[in-house]
């Protein structure tokens, strides 16, 4: 028998063939192994923001490891053989009844708090059983309750919203796309958007991307209208369906850092109503908004940013808050506020769509990680609503300080060479070069020589036609979120030096022609 031929690619599905290698990973490999390199290219949350310093697990008694779990246990009083296939929790707020963070108490086997050196422990056998079991529902029930209560109190959706837990926002967006599109359909999105979703979700699905021009607030309503017209004309000429889905990152947009104002959201929503679009509101950085220009102007210059200066949960209205037509499905994630390693997010929107998404999630992965859901849920419950908001304010203050450090360093080292907007959310500065016509090979070489990495904007560019034409794209995404202020300063110093050297090289090349 001949060995299977994996090298030719003849066994790959059409779906896999349509998925290109990650352009971000490929770019990062060019800078791999550099010693003392300031890495400003990857949008990792800061480890300083992670809430847990340690995690202790206790083995179950030996009989439980080698035999079936008895249905009756001290943690499930009143249960009897055959009454249920899993132990029940002692106390548990039913769906829709709870208040923020009120779903677990000390009697449930969770004790301690998250202040100072405190923590929490999970002692109830029933809770640990659920943490190690499949979950064939919309998620671990207490966590679903927390998410539902949060959506209701923070966003106040006009028509209400159903909720399901997902394995982060990536799974949520992929599931929504699977529910709402077929191969060959159009997808509307910002002209610069999260590259991984283009490469791993849109392209394998064979979706036709319609990029929408942006400004400092993100999507332009008139540009969205024009894209809808263009899509409708293409649909009529090719027998496709007209555009029906808009994917947007409205807060701390990746890669631009843009934050969409309330008036702009109303205008975008009106276009969506006119063209009957479903809006996928992917708002990973919504929780990391740390103040507009008015808030900053009230801050005493030179004084440190404190959590008391931060908005906490008093954040601007979302698309879900405006959704009178049940056309918004909102994606949230714990990745940017607790940590990406938990792989937990949640989806909220119209019940029929959320139910279908939960079905897709269950079919694809048998649900998110039960252990992660239980740990996150019990941590939030141990905190309570006041401590959660306090933790959120700490996160916002930390990212605000780093954003201010990035802006100050950019002013010092990039003035006259580039333009940028002061970040008010998220962890990115989108730098437009004025000293070079593009991110040239000479600039990439100088970045490597200076041992600093920033991501070319071209990797996020959703305009395939412009890419094919080879149009210039003099943009860099600089990430400050995961760096201390000293490294932020040093990174911009090196970036400025690389730009100066690249300009000199370009002049020599021009003179040689």
Image (cartoon, helix red, strand yellow):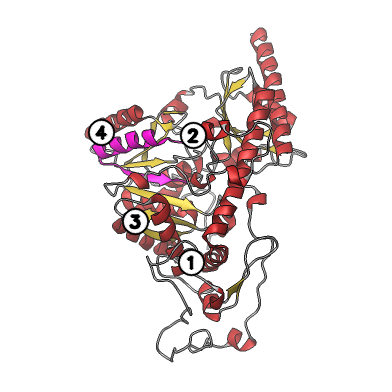
Query: Of helix, strand and loop, which one carries label 4?
Result: helix
Instruction: Look at mark 2 in the image and give the residue it sits on.
Output: 258
Query: Of helix, strand and loop, which one carries label 1?
Result: loop
* Mark-to-mark CA distance, 4 and 3: 30 Å
Q: Residues within 10 Å of mark 1 (few under 14, many from 20)?
A: many
Q: Nearer the viewer, residue 471 or 97?
A: 97
Cβ–Cβ under 8 Å for marks 4 and 2: no
* Residue at the spot 72% in from the left edge and 29% down from the top edge: 494
Q: Residues within 10 Å of mark 4 (few under 14, many from 20)?
A: some
> Exactly how many numbered labels are in the figure?
4
Instruction: Look at mark 3 in the image and give the residue it sits on.
Output: 161
* Mark-to-mark CA distance, 4 and 2: 28 Å
Query: Of helix, strand and loop, which one carries label 3?
Result: loop
Q: Nearer the viewer, mark 2 or mark 1?
A: 1
Cβ–Cβ under 8 Å for marks 2 and 1: no
Q: Residues within 10 Å of mark 2 (few under 14, many from 20)?
A: many
Q: Which residues are magenta?
A: 259-283
In percent of width and height, residue 97 lies at: 38, 67
Q: Nearer the viewer, mark 4 or mark 2?
A: 2
Cβ–Cβ under 8 Å for marks 1 and 4: no
Instruction: Look at mark 1 in the image and give the residue it sits on.
Output: 102
């Amino acid at each position: 028998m001949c060995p299977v031929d994996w090298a030719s690619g003849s066994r790959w599905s059409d779906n896999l063939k349509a998925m290109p290698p990650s352009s971000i990973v490929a770019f990062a490999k060019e800078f791999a192994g550099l010693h003392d390199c300031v890495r400003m290219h990857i949008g990792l949350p800061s480890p300083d923001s992670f809430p847990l310093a340690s995690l202790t697990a206790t083995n179950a008694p030996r009989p439980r490891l080698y035999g079936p779990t008895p249905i009756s246990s001290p943690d499930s009083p009143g249960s009897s053989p055959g009454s249920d296939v899993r132990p029940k929790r002692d106390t548990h707020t039913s769906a829709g009844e709870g208040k923020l963070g009120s779903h677990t108490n000390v009697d449930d086997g969770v004790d301690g708090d998250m202040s100072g050196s405190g923590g929490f422990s999970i002692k109830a056998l029933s809770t640990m059983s659920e943490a190690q079991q499949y979950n064939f529902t919309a998620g671990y029930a207490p966590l679903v309750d927390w998410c539902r209560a949060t959506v209701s109190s923070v966003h106040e959706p006009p028509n209400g919203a159903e909720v399901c837990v997902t394995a982060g926002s990536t799974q949520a967006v992929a599931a929504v796309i699977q529910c709402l599109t077929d191969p060959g359909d159009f997808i509307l999105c910002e002209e610069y958007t999260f590259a991984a979703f283009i490469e791993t979700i849109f392209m394998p699905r064979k979706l036709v991307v319609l990029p929408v021009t942006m400004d400092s607030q993100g999507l332009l309503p008139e540009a969205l209208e024009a894209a809808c017209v263009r899509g409708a004309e293409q649909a009529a000429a090719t027998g496709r369906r007209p555009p029906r889905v808009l994917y947007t990152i409205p807060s701390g947009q990746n890669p631009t850092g843009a934050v969409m104002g309330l008036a702009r959201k109303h205008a975008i929503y009106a276009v969506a109503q006119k063209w009957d679009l479903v809006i996928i509101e992917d708002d990973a950085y919504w929780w990391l908004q740390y103040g507009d220009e008015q808030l900053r102007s009230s801050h005493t210059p030179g004084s440190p940013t404190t959590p008391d200066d931060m908005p906490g949960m008093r954040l601007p209205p979302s698309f879900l808050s405006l959704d009178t037509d049940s056309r918004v499905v909102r994606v949230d994630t714990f990745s940017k506020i607790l940590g990406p390693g938990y792989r937990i997010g949640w989806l909220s929107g119209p019940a029929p769509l959320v139910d279908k998404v939960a079905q897709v999630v269950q079919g694809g992965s048998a649900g998110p990680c039960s252990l992660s859901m239980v740990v996150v849920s019990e941590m939030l419950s141990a905190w309570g609503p006041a401590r959660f908001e306090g933790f959120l304010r700490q996160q916002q203050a930390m990212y605000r300080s780093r954003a201010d450090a990035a802006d100050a360093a950019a002013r010092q080292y990039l003035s006259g060479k580039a333009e940028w907007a002061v970040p008010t959310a998220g962890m990115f500065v989108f730098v437009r070069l004025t000293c070079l016509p593009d991110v040239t090979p000479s600039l990439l070489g100088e970045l490597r020589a200076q041992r600093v990495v920033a991501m070319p904007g071209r990797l996020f560019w959703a305009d395939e036609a412009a890419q094919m034409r080879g149009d210039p794209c003099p943009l860099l995404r600089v990430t400050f979120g995961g760096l201390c202020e000293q490294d932020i300063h040093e990174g911009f110093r090196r970036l400025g030096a690389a730009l100066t050297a690249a300009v000199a090289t370009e002049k020599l090349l021009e003179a040689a022609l």
